[in-house]
Amino acid sequence: MRYVRKICPVCGNEFTVLEKMEEKAVYCTLRCFLESQNKMSEDEDSHSLSG
Ligand SMILES: [Zn+2]
């Protein structure tokens, strides 16, 4: 089986996935996946009162 290296767009962590899973595995962990979803929904809100 072949593995490919990918860079997580959320945390910048490098991780390896099976070549046939490359298209599905975008984030290194499920947590990063959820975080990316949150960012998308919070994009409209430009307030930054709490860091
Ligand atoms: Zn990540």
Image (tube, helix red, strand yellow):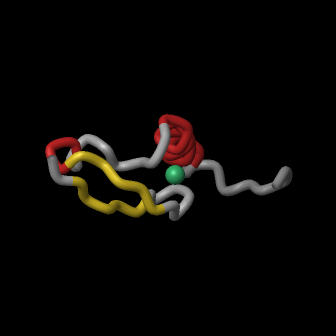
> What residue sits 31% from the left and 44% below the top?
25
Identify whether 46 is placed above or below 34.
below
Residue 1 location in percent, x, y?
A: 15, 46
Residue 39 location in percent, x, y?
A: 55, 47
Task: Depth check: give the residue in front, 40 or 46.
Answer: 40
> What residue sits 51% from the left and 64% below the top?
12
Task: Depth check: give the residue in front, 38 or 49.
Answer: 38
> What residue sits 34% from the left and 49% below the top?
26
Residue 11 location in percent, x, y?
A: 56, 58
Identify whether 48 is placed above or below 27.
below
**How many marks overall?**
0
Residue 50 location in percent, x, y?
A: 85, 50
Left or right: 20 as drawn, with respect to 39? left
Left or right: 16 as drawn, with respect to 2? right
Task: Depth check: give the residue in front, 35 or 4.
Answer: 4
Quadrant of the rendered image containing residue 8: bottom left
Identify whether 50 is placed above or below 35.
below
| Most distant residue in the right direction | 50
